[in-house]
Image (spheres, coloured by chain):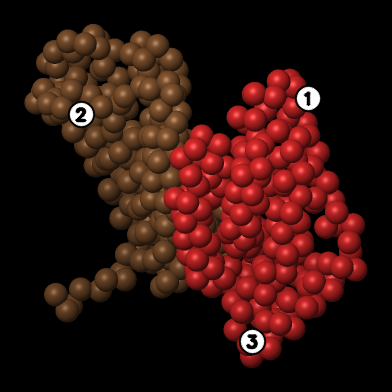
Chain colours: A red, B brown
Amino acid sequence: MNAFLTVLRRDLLLAYRRRADVATTLFFFVIVVSLFPLGVGPEMDTLRTIAPGVVWVAALLASMLSLGRLFASDHADGTLEQMALAPQPLWLIVMAKVWAHWMVSGLPLALMAPVLGLQFDLPAQALAVLVVSLLLGTPVLSLIGAIGAALTLGLRGGGVLLSLLVLPLYIPVLIFGAGAVEATMTGIGAEGHLSLLGAFLILAFLATPFVAALALRIAME
Amino acid sequence: MMGINWFKYASPATFYPLAGRMIPWFYGLAAVFCVAGLYVSFFLAPTDATQGEAYRVIFIHVPAAWMSMFIYLVMAFWAGIGLAFNTRLSSMMAQALAPTGALFTFLALWTGALWGKPTWGTWWVWDARLTSELILLFLYMGYMSLTAAIDDPRRADKAGAILALVGAVNVPIIYFSVQWWNTLHQGASVSLTRAPSMAKVMLVGMLLMALAAWMYAIAAALSRVRLLILEREKNTTWVQALLERRS
Protein backbone atom coordinates (compact mmCIF):
# COMPACT_ATOMS: atom_id res chain seq x y z
CA MET A 1 0.00 0.00 0.00
CA ASN A 2 2.92 2.25 0.82
CA ALA A 3 4.42 1.68 -2.62
CA PHE A 4 1.06 2.41 -4.20
CA LEU A 5 0.78 5.78 -2.44
CA THR A 6 4.40 6.69 -3.12
CA VAL A 7 4.12 6.03 -6.85
CA LEU A 8 0.75 7.78 -6.97
CA ARG A 9 2.13 10.88 -5.27
CA ARG A 10 5.25 10.85 -7.43
CA ASP A 11 3.28 10.60 -10.68
CA LEU A 12 0.84 13.29 -9.61
CA LEU A 13 3.73 15.55 -8.67
CA LEU A 14 5.38 14.92 -12.05
CA ALA A 15 2.11 15.71 -13.81
CA TYR A 16 1.77 18.87 -11.74
CA ARG A 17 5.25 19.96 -12.78
CA ARG A 18 4.23 19.46 -16.40
CA ARG A 19 0.83 21.09 -16.20
CA ALA A 20 0.86 21.96 -19.89
CA ASP A 21 0.55 18.27 -20.83
CA VAL A 22 -2.63 17.92 -18.83
CA ALA A 23 -4.02 21.10 -20.34
CA THR A 24 -3.20 19.92 -23.87
CA THR A 25 -5.28 16.77 -23.46
CA LEU A 26 -8.16 18.78 -22.06
CA PHE A 27 -8.05 21.34 -24.86
CA PHE A 28 -7.88 18.58 -27.44
CA PHE A 29 -11.10 17.22 -25.96
CA VAL A 30 -12.76 20.65 -26.08
CA ILE A 31 -11.65 21.35 -29.64
CA VAL A 32 -12.76 17.99 -31.04
CA VAL A 33 -16.20 18.37 -29.46
CA SER A 34 -16.52 21.94 -30.70
CA LEU A 35 -15.66 20.92 -34.26
CA PHE A 36 -18.78 18.81 -34.61
CA PRO A 37 -21.35 21.65 -34.65
CA LEU A 38 -19.20 23.32 -37.30
CA GLY A 39 -19.22 20.19 -39.40
CA VAL A 40 -22.79 19.05 -38.82
CA GLY A 41 -24.53 22.42 -38.69
CA PRO A 42 -26.02 24.39 -35.82
CA GLU A 43 -29.49 22.76 -35.68
CA MET A 44 -30.04 22.13 -31.99
CA ASP A 45 -32.22 19.05 -32.53
CA THR A 46 -29.50 17.25 -34.48
CA LEU A 47 -26.83 18.35 -32.04
CA ARG A 48 -28.81 17.13 -29.07
CA THR A 49 -29.13 13.64 -30.55
CA ILE A 50 -25.46 13.31 -31.49
CA ALA A 51 -24.11 14.96 -28.31
CA PRO A 52 -23.60 11.78 -26.19
CA GLY A 53 -21.73 10.02 -28.95
CA VAL A 54 -19.64 13.05 -29.85
CA VAL A 55 -18.57 13.76 -26.28
CA TRP A 56 -17.78 10.11 -25.66
CA VAL A 57 -15.79 9.62 -28.86
CA ALA A 58 -13.83 12.78 -28.10
CA ALA A 59 -13.16 11.50 -24.57
CA LEU A 60 -11.97 8.19 -26.03
CA LEU A 61 -9.53 9.95 -28.36
CA ALA A 62 -8.31 12.36 -25.70
CA SER A 63 -7.63 9.67 -23.13
CA MET A 64 -5.93 7.55 -25.80
CA LEU A 65 -3.63 10.41 -26.81
CA SER A 66 -2.43 10.83 -23.26
CA LEU A 67 -1.62 7.12 -22.93
CA GLY A 68 1.76 7.60 -24.58
CA ARG A 69 2.96 9.42 -21.47
CA LEU A 70 1.93 6.63 -19.12
CA PHE A 71 5.18 4.64 -19.24
CA ALA A 72 7.30 6.34 -21.91
CA SER A 73 9.30 8.82 -19.82
CA ASP A 74 9.91 6.30 -17.05
CA HIS A 75 11.06 3.83 -19.67
CA ALA A 76 13.38 6.38 -21.26
CA ASP A 77 15.26 7.25 -18.05
CA GLY A 78 15.34 3.72 -16.65
CA THR A 79 12.98 4.33 -13.74
CA LEU A 80 10.66 1.65 -15.05
CA GLU A 81 13.37 -1.00 -14.81
CA GLN A 82 14.02 -0.06 -11.20
CA MET A 83 10.30 -0.35 -10.54
CA ALA A 84 10.29 -3.82 -12.13
CA LEU A 85 13.18 -4.82 -9.85
CA ALA A 86 11.50 -3.44 -6.74
CA PRO A 87 10.34 -5.95 -4.08
CA GLN A 88 6.79 -4.64 -4.44
CA PRO A 89 4.76 -6.39 -7.15
CA LEU A 90 4.85 -4.63 -10.49
CA TRP A 91 1.08 -4.75 -10.91
CA LEU A 92 0.67 -2.62 -7.80
CA ILE A 93 2.98 0.01 -9.24
CA VAL A 94 1.15 -0.21 -12.58
CA MET A 95 -2.13 0.27 -10.75
CA ALA A 96 -0.78 3.39 -9.02
CA LYS A 97 0.50 4.79 -12.30
CA VAL A 98 -2.81 4.13 -14.05
CA TRP A 99 -4.68 5.72 -11.17
CA ALA A 100 -2.48 8.82 -11.34
CA HIS A 101 -2.88 8.89 -15.10
CA TRP A 102 -6.64 8.79 -14.77
CA MET A 103 -6.64 11.63 -12.24
CA VAL A 104 -4.83 13.90 -14.70
CA SER A 105 -6.52 12.72 -17.92
CA GLY A 106 -9.92 11.09 -17.31
CA LEU A 107 -11.08 13.08 -14.32
CA PRO A 108 -10.61 16.53 -15.93
CA LEU A 109 -12.52 15.30 -19.00
CA ALA A 110 -15.44 14.18 -16.84
CA LEU A 111 -15.49 17.52 -15.01
CA MET A 112 -15.27 19.46 -18.27
CA ALA A 113 -17.98 17.47 -20.06
CA PRO A 114 -21.05 19.31 -18.64
CA VAL A 115 -19.84 22.59 -20.11
CA LEU A 116 -19.53 20.96 -23.52
CA GLY A 117 -22.90 19.28 -23.01
CA LEU A 118 -24.43 22.73 -22.54
CA GLN A 119 -23.11 23.71 -25.97
CA PHE A 120 -25.16 20.83 -27.33
CA ASP A 121 -28.23 21.86 -25.35
CA LEU A 122 -28.38 18.69 -23.23
CA PRO A 123 -30.98 18.74 -20.42
CA ALA A 124 -29.71 18.92 -16.84
CA GLN A 125 -30.47 15.31 -16.03
CA ALA A 126 -28.58 14.08 -19.09
CA LEU A 127 -25.62 16.25 -18.07
CA ALA A 128 -25.51 14.58 -14.68
CA VAL A 129 -25.62 11.13 -16.27
CA LEU A 130 -22.91 12.17 -18.72
CA VAL A 131 -20.58 13.05 -15.85
CA VAL A 132 -21.37 9.82 -13.98
CA SER A 133 -20.87 7.72 -17.10
CA LEU A 134 -17.53 9.41 -17.78
CA LEU A 135 -16.47 8.95 -14.16
CA LEU A 136 -17.22 5.23 -14.43
CA GLY A 137 -15.97 4.77 -17.99
CA THR A 138 -12.73 6.75 -18.23
CA PRO A 139 -10.92 4.62 -15.59
CA VAL A 140 -11.72 1.58 -17.76
CA LEU A 141 -10.18 3.40 -20.72
CA SER A 142 -7.02 4.13 -18.71
CA LEU A 143 -6.82 0.53 -17.46
CA ILE A 144 -7.26 -1.06 -20.89
CA GLY A 145 -5.03 1.59 -22.41
CA ALA A 146 -2.24 0.67 -19.97
CA ILE A 147 -2.01 -2.74 -21.68
CA GLY A 148 -1.70 -1.09 -25.08
CA ALA A 149 0.82 1.45 -23.79
CA ALA A 150 2.92 -1.35 -22.28
CA LEU A 151 2.79 -3.44 -25.46
CA THR A 152 3.88 -0.56 -27.71
CA LEU A 153 6.55 0.75 -25.34
CA GLY A 154 9.50 2.11 -27.28
CA LEU A 155 8.27 1.06 -30.72
CA ARG A 156 8.47 3.00 -33.97
CA GLY A 157 5.22 4.85 -34.62
CA GLY A 158 3.98 3.77 -31.21
CA GLY A 159 1.23 6.37 -31.07
CA VAL A 160 -0.66 5.34 -34.19
CA LEU A 161 -0.13 1.67 -33.42
CA LEU A 162 -1.47 2.20 -29.92
CA SER A 163 -4.72 3.60 -31.29
CA LEU A 164 -5.08 0.61 -33.59
CA LEU A 165 -4.71 -1.79 -30.66
CA VAL A 166 -6.73 0.03 -28.07
CA LEU A 167 -9.68 1.60 -29.89
CA PRO A 168 -11.44 -1.69 -30.80
CA LEU A 169 -11.19 -2.73 -27.14
CA TYR A 170 -12.80 0.57 -26.09
CA ILE A 171 -16.00 -0.13 -28.03
CA PRO A 172 -18.08 -1.66 -25.20
CA VAL A 173 -17.31 1.32 -22.96
CA LEU A 174 -18.30 3.71 -25.74
CA ILE A 175 -21.56 1.88 -26.36
CA PHE A 176 -22.68 1.90 -22.76
CA GLY A 177 -21.24 5.32 -21.90
CA ALA A 178 -22.97 7.12 -24.72
CA GLY A 179 -25.96 4.78 -24.34
CA ALA A 180 -26.47 5.85 -20.72
CA VAL A 181 -26.86 9.50 -21.72
CA GLU A 182 -29.11 8.62 -24.63
CA ALA A 183 -31.28 6.39 -22.46
CA THR A 184 -31.78 9.27 -20.03
CA MET A 185 -32.84 11.57 -22.83
CA THR A 186 -35.33 9.08 -24.24
CA GLY A 187 -36.70 8.39 -20.77
CA ILE A 188 -35.67 4.74 -20.46
CA GLY A 189 -33.41 5.42 -17.49
CA ALA A 190 -29.66 4.94 -17.37
CA GLU A 191 -29.39 2.42 -14.51
CA GLY A 192 -28.78 -0.57 -16.76
CA HIS A 193 -26.05 1.12 -18.75
CA LEU A 194 -24.36 2.56 -15.68
CA SER A 195 -24.45 -0.81 -13.90
CA LEU A 196 -22.74 -2.42 -16.89
CA LEU A 197 -20.13 0.33 -16.95
CA GLY A 198 -19.53 -0.35 -13.27
CA ALA A 199 -19.17 -4.04 -14.03
CA PHE A 200 -16.60 -3.27 -16.74
CA LEU A 201 -14.74 -1.09 -14.26
CA ILE A 202 -14.55 -3.89 -11.69
CA LEU A 203 -13.48 -6.42 -14.32
CA ALA A 204 -10.83 -4.11 -15.75
CA PHE A 205 -9.65 -3.21 -12.25
CA LEU A 206 -9.16 -6.87 -11.33
CA ALA A 207 -7.57 -8.09 -14.55
CA THR A 208 -5.74 -5.37 -16.47
CA PRO A 209 -2.96 -4.42 -13.99
CA PHE A 210 -1.59 -7.97 -14.12
CA VAL A 211 -1.74 -8.10 -17.91
CA ALA A 212 -0.14 -4.66 -18.21
CA ALA A 213 2.62 -5.68 -15.78
CA LEU A 214 3.28 -8.82 -17.84
CA ALA A 215 3.38 -6.74 -21.03
CA LEU A 216 5.84 -4.33 -19.38
CA ARG A 217 8.15 -7.19 -18.44
CA ILE A 218 8.06 -8.45 -22.03
CA ALA A 219 8.82 -4.96 -23.32
CA MET A 220 11.80 -4.58 -21.00
CA GLU A 221 13.39 -8.01 -21.62
CA MET B 1 0.50 -43.65 -24.64
CA MET B 2 3.37 -42.78 -22.32
CA GLY B 3 5.96 -43.41 -25.03
CA ILE B 4 4.80 -40.59 -27.27
CA ASN B 5 7.14 -37.65 -27.38
CA TRP B 6 4.64 -34.81 -27.48
CA PHE B 7 7.25 -32.23 -28.21
CA LYS B 8 8.89 -33.98 -31.15
CA TYR B 9 7.17 -31.75 -33.70
CA ALA B 10 7.40 -28.66 -31.49
CA SER B 11 10.89 -28.20 -32.86
CA PRO B 12 10.97 -26.13 -36.06
CA ALA B 13 13.63 -28.43 -37.53
CA THR B 14 11.37 -31.50 -37.39
CA PHE B 15 8.16 -29.62 -38.11
CA TYR B 16 9.44 -27.97 -41.27
CA PRO B 17 9.63 -31.18 -43.39
CA LEU B 18 6.41 -32.52 -41.81
CA ALA B 19 4.55 -29.35 -42.81
CA GLY B 20 6.05 -29.61 -46.28
CA ARG B 21 4.63 -33.13 -46.64
CA MET B 22 1.20 -32.13 -45.29
CA ILE B 23 0.64 -29.00 -47.37
CA PRO B 24 -0.12 -30.74 -50.73
CA TRP B 25 -2.65 -33.00 -48.99
CA PHE B 26 -4.52 -30.12 -47.44
CA TYR B 27 -4.48 -28.13 -50.66
CA GLY B 28 -5.74 -31.25 -52.48
CA LEU B 29 -8.52 -31.78 -49.94
CA ALA B 30 -9.44 -28.10 -50.21
CA ALA B 31 -9.70 -28.40 -54.00
CA VAL B 32 -11.84 -31.58 -53.79
CA PHE B 33 -14.21 -30.09 -51.21
CA CYS B 34 -14.34 -26.83 -53.13
CA VAL B 35 -15.28 -28.51 -56.43
CA ALA B 36 -17.89 -30.68 -54.70
CA GLY B 37 -19.23 -27.71 -52.75
CA LEU B 38 -19.44 -25.49 -55.82
CA TYR B 39 -21.19 -28.25 -57.77
CA VAL B 40 -23.78 -28.72 -55.02
CA SER B 41 -24.29 -25.00 -54.53
CA PHE B 42 -24.63 -24.08 -58.20
CA PHE B 43 -26.24 -27.12 -59.82
CA LEU B 44 -28.05 -29.07 -57.12
CA ALA B 45 -29.26 -26.37 -54.71
CA PRO B 46 -32.62 -24.97 -55.82
CA THR B 47 -33.31 -21.29 -56.36
CA ASP B 48 -34.56 -19.71 -53.15
CA ALA B 49 -38.24 -18.82 -53.17
CA THR B 50 -37.84 -15.35 -51.65
CA GLN B 51 -34.25 -14.33 -52.39
CA GLY B 52 -33.82 -15.71 -55.90
CA GLU B 53 -30.32 -16.56 -57.06
CA ALA B 54 -28.65 -13.96 -54.86
CA TYR B 55 -28.83 -16.25 -51.85
CA ARG B 56 -26.05 -18.40 -53.35
CA VAL B 57 -23.57 -15.94 -51.85
CA ILE B 58 -24.09 -17.71 -48.53
CA PHE B 59 -22.10 -20.70 -49.80
CA ILE B 60 -18.98 -18.57 -49.56
CA HIS B 61 -20.21 -16.02 -47.01
CA VAL B 62 -21.17 -18.33 -44.17
CA PRO B 63 -18.02 -20.51 -44.32
CA ALA B 64 -15.89 -17.35 -44.43
CA ALA B 65 -17.67 -15.93 -41.40
CA TRP B 66 -17.27 -19.21 -39.49
CA MET B 67 -13.60 -19.46 -40.35
CA SER B 68 -12.93 -15.83 -39.41
CA MET B 69 -14.13 -16.45 -35.85
CA PHE B 70 -12.68 -19.95 -35.57
CA ILE B 71 -9.23 -18.87 -36.77
CA TYR B 72 -9.14 -16.07 -34.20
CA LEU B 73 -9.75 -18.61 -31.44
CA VAL B 74 -7.10 -20.98 -32.84
CA MET B 75 -4.69 -18.08 -33.16
CA ALA B 76 -5.29 -17.00 -29.57
CA PHE B 77 -4.89 -20.64 -28.49
CA TRP B 78 -1.48 -21.03 -30.16
CA ALA B 79 -0.41 -17.60 -28.94
CA GLY B 80 -1.38 -18.58 -25.39
CA ILE B 81 0.49 -21.90 -25.67
CA GLY B 82 3.51 -20.02 -26.96
CA LEU B 83 3.35 -17.61 -24.04
CA ALA B 84 2.82 -20.33 -21.42
CA PHE B 85 5.33 -22.96 -22.61
CA ASN B 86 7.72 -20.65 -24.44
CA THR B 87 7.56 -22.80 -27.56
CA ARG B 88 8.71 -20.87 -30.59
CA LEU B 89 6.69 -22.84 -33.08
CA SER B 90 3.35 -22.10 -31.37
CA SER B 91 3.95 -18.37 -31.64
CA MET B 92 4.96 -18.72 -35.26
CA MET B 93 1.77 -20.68 -35.90
CA ALA B 94 -0.28 -17.86 -34.35
CA GLN B 95 1.41 -15.32 -36.58
CA ALA B 96 0.95 -17.51 -39.63
CA LEU B 97 -2.78 -17.81 -38.97
CA ALA B 98 -3.48 -14.09 -38.63
CA PRO B 99 -3.39 -13.07 -42.33
CA THR B 100 -5.63 -15.99 -43.32
CA GLY B 101 -8.08 -15.06 -40.57
CA ALA B 102 -8.09 -11.44 -41.66
CA LEU B 103 -8.64 -12.56 -45.25
CA PHE B 104 -11.69 -14.61 -44.28
CA THR B 105 -13.05 -11.74 -42.18
CA PHE B 106 -12.70 -9.40 -45.11
CA LEU B 107 -14.28 -11.97 -47.41
CA ALA B 108 -17.23 -12.40 -45.05
CA LEU B 109 -17.80 -8.63 -44.93
CA TRP B 110 -17.41 -8.22 -48.67
CA THR B 111 -19.70 -11.07 -49.67
CA GLY B 112 -22.14 -9.93 -46.99
CA ALA B 113 -22.30 -6.55 -48.69
CA LEU B 114 -22.80 -8.20 -52.08
CA TRP B 115 -25.64 -10.23 -50.61
CA GLY B 116 -27.15 -7.28 -48.76
CA LYS B 117 -27.50 -5.06 -51.83
CA PRO B 118 -30.02 -7.21 -53.75
CA THR B 119 -31.70 -8.62 -50.62
CA TRP B 120 -31.94 -5.65 -48.27
CA GLY B 121 -31.36 -2.93 -50.85
CA THR B 122 -28.29 -1.63 -49.03
CA TRP B 123 -24.59 -2.52 -48.92
CA TRP B 124 -24.26 -2.09 -45.20
CA VAL B 125 -26.46 -1.99 -42.12
CA TRP B 126 -25.27 -1.48 -38.57
CA ASP B 127 -26.49 -4.91 -37.64
CA ALA B 128 -24.96 -6.59 -34.58
CA ARG B 129 -23.32 -9.37 -36.59
CA LEU B 130 -21.91 -7.09 -39.26
CA THR B 131 -20.57 -4.68 -36.69
CA SER B 132 -18.89 -7.36 -34.60
CA GLU B 133 -17.39 -8.89 -37.74
CA LEU B 134 -15.97 -5.47 -38.60
CA ILE B 135 -14.51 -5.16 -35.10
CA LEU B 136 -13.00 -8.63 -35.51
CA LEU B 137 -11.24 -7.32 -38.62
CA PHE B 138 -9.88 -4.43 -36.54
CA LEU B 139 -8.59 -6.90 -33.95
CA TYR B 140 -6.77 -8.91 -36.64
CA MET B 141 -5.30 -5.69 -38.05
CA GLY B 142 -4.12 -4.63 -34.60
CA TYR B 143 -2.47 -8.01 -34.00
CA MET B 144 -0.70 -7.99 -37.36
CA SER B 145 0.48 -4.37 -37.02
CA LEU B 146 1.81 -5.00 -33.52
CA THR B 147 3.79 -8.11 -34.49
CA ALA B 148 5.06 -6.34 -37.61
CA ALA B 149 6.18 -3.26 -35.68
CA ILE B 150 8.42 -5.16 -33.24
CA ASP B 151 11.80 -6.11 -34.67
CA ASP B 152 12.81 -8.62 -32.03
CA PRO B 153 10.83 -11.77 -32.94
CA ARG B 154 10.63 -13.09 -29.37
CA ARG B 155 9.15 -9.84 -28.10
CA ALA B 156 6.82 -9.70 -31.12
CA ASP B 157 5.58 -13.22 -30.27
CA LYS B 158 4.89 -12.45 -26.64
CA ALA B 159 3.39 -8.99 -27.15
CA GLY B 160 1.20 -10.38 -29.92
CA ALA B 161 0.14 -13.24 -27.67
CA ILE B 162 -1.00 -10.87 -24.93
CA LEU B 163 -2.95 -8.81 -27.45
CA ALA B 164 -4.55 -11.90 -29.00
CA LEU B 165 -5.59 -13.22 -25.58
CA VAL B 166 -6.94 -9.85 -24.44
CA GLY B 167 -8.84 -9.70 -27.73
CA ALA B 168 -10.21 -13.22 -27.25
CA VAL B 169 -11.50 -12.29 -23.79
CA ASN B 170 -13.01 -9.14 -25.25
CA VAL B 171 -14.72 -10.75 -28.23
CA PRO B 172 -17.76 -12.01 -26.26
CA ILE B 173 -18.04 -8.69 -24.39
CA ILE B 174 -17.90 -6.78 -27.66
CA TYR B 175 -20.39 -9.14 -29.28
CA PHE B 176 -23.00 -8.77 -26.55
CA SER B 177 -22.45 -5.02 -26.26
CA VAL B 178 -22.99 -4.58 -29.96
CA GLN B 179 -26.03 -6.83 -29.88
CA TRP B 180 -27.63 -4.85 -27.07
CA TRP B 181 -26.68 -1.56 -28.68
CA ASN B 182 -28.31 -2.79 -31.88
CA THR B 183 -31.58 -3.87 -30.27
CA LEU B 184 -31.87 -0.47 -28.60
CA HIS B 185 -31.54 1.21 -31.97
CA GLN B 186 -34.10 -0.71 -33.96
CA GLY B 187 -34.96 2.30 -36.08
CA ALA B 188 -34.33 1.10 -39.63
CA SER B 189 -35.07 -2.50 -38.83
CA VAL B 190 -33.60 -5.19 -41.03
CA SER B 191 -33.98 -8.70 -39.76
CA LEU B 192 -31.24 -11.18 -40.43
CA THR B 193 -33.29 -14.21 -39.44
CA ARG B 194 -33.76 -16.41 -42.43
CA ALA B 195 -36.35 -19.07 -43.03
CA PRO B 196 -35.86 -21.49 -40.14
CA SER B 197 -35.76 -24.67 -42.16
CA MET B 198 -32.99 -24.63 -44.71
CA ALA B 199 -33.18 -27.11 -47.55
CA LYS B 200 -30.90 -30.05 -46.82
CA VAL B 201 -29.01 -29.71 -50.08
CA MET B 202 -28.18 -26.08 -49.27
CA LEU B 203 -26.82 -27.14 -45.90
CA VAL B 204 -24.69 -29.84 -47.54
CA GLY B 205 -23.28 -27.30 -49.99
CA MET B 206 -22.48 -24.90 -47.18
CA LEU B 207 -20.79 -27.59 -45.09
CA LEU B 208 -18.70 -28.73 -48.07
CA MET B 209 -17.59 -25.17 -48.68
CA ALA B 210 -16.82 -24.76 -44.99
CA LEU B 211 -14.62 -27.87 -45.12
CA ALA B 212 -12.90 -26.48 -48.21
CA ALA B 213 -12.26 -23.19 -46.42
CA TRP B 214 -10.96 -25.08 -43.39
CA MET B 215 -8.54 -27.20 -45.41
CA TYR B 216 -7.38 -24.13 -47.32
CA ALA B 217 -6.79 -22.25 -44.07
CA ILE B 218 -4.65 -25.10 -42.72
CA ALA B 219 -2.64 -25.35 -45.94
CA ALA B 220 -2.11 -21.59 -46.17
CA ALA B 221 -1.11 -21.32 -42.51
CA LEU B 222 1.34 -24.22 -42.87
CA SER B 223 2.93 -22.65 -45.95
CA ARG B 224 3.29 -19.37 -44.11
CA VAL B 225 4.70 -20.99 -40.99
CA ARG B 226 7.34 -22.73 -43.15
CA LEU B 227 8.46 -19.34 -44.43
CA LEU B 228 8.53 -17.95 -40.91
CA ILE B 229 10.63 -20.91 -39.76
CA LEU B 230 13.14 -20.38 -42.56
CA GLU B 231 13.31 -16.67 -41.87
CA ARG B 232 13.93 -17.05 -38.16
CA GLU B 233 16.15 -20.11 -38.25
CA LYS B 234 18.31 -18.97 -41.15
CA ASN B 235 21.44 -19.02 -39.01
CA THR B 236 21.01 -22.58 -37.79
CA THR B 237 22.91 -25.50 -39.23
CA TRP B 238 19.86 -27.45 -40.42
CA VAL B 239 18.64 -24.56 -42.56
CA GLN B 240 22.13 -24.08 -43.96
CA ALA B 241 22.26 -27.79 -44.80
CA LEU B 242 18.83 -27.59 -46.38
CA LEU B 243 19.88 -24.67 -48.55
CA GLU B 244 23.04 -26.45 -49.64
CA ARG B 245 21.06 -29.51 -50.65
CA ARG B 246 18.71 -27.33 -52.69
CA SER B 247 21.38 -25.43 -54.56
Q: Which of A172 and B203 is in front in this view?
A: A172
> Which x, y percent locates residue B1?
14, 75
The subunit letter for the residue under badge 3 reads: A
Q: Quadrant for the N terminus of chain A, please.
A: bottom right
Res A1 label:
3
Q: Distance between the residues labelled 2 and 3?
A: 58 Å
Q: Nearer the viewer, mark 2 or mark 3?
A: 3
Res B206 label:
2
Please state which amino acid type lies under the numbered disc 3.
Met
How busy is the neighbourhood of tag 2: few (under 14 within 10 Å), some, or many (20 plus)? many
Does residue A124 lie above or below A209 as drawn?
above
Res A4 label:
none
For the question of whether residue A30 can be seen, the reply is: yes
Query: Contact (CB < 8 A) between labels 2 and 3?
Result: no
Q: Quadrant for the C terminus of chain A, please.
A: bottom right
**Disc 2 element:** helix
> Which x, y percent locates residue B204?
13, 29
Please state which amino acid type lies under the numbered disc 2.
Met
Does residue B177 lie above or below B90 as drawn?
above
How busy is the neighbourhood of tag 1: few (under 14 within 10 Å), some, or many (20 plus)? few
**Image position of B23 (left or right of A154):** left
Res A38 label:
1
Look at 75% across and 27% down and name the residue there. A37
> Which x, y percent locates residue A129?
60, 48
Q: Can you name the residue that lies furthest to the left here? A: B200
Please state which amino acid type lies under the numbered disc 1.
Leu
Task: Identify the image quadrant of residue B37.
Answer: top left
**Image position of B233 (left or right of A66):** left
The subunit letter for the residue under badge 2 reads: B
Q: Nearer the viewer, mark 1 or mark 2?
A: 1
Sequence-first tag of 3 and 1 = 3
Q: Nearer the viewer, residue B231 or B201?
A: B201
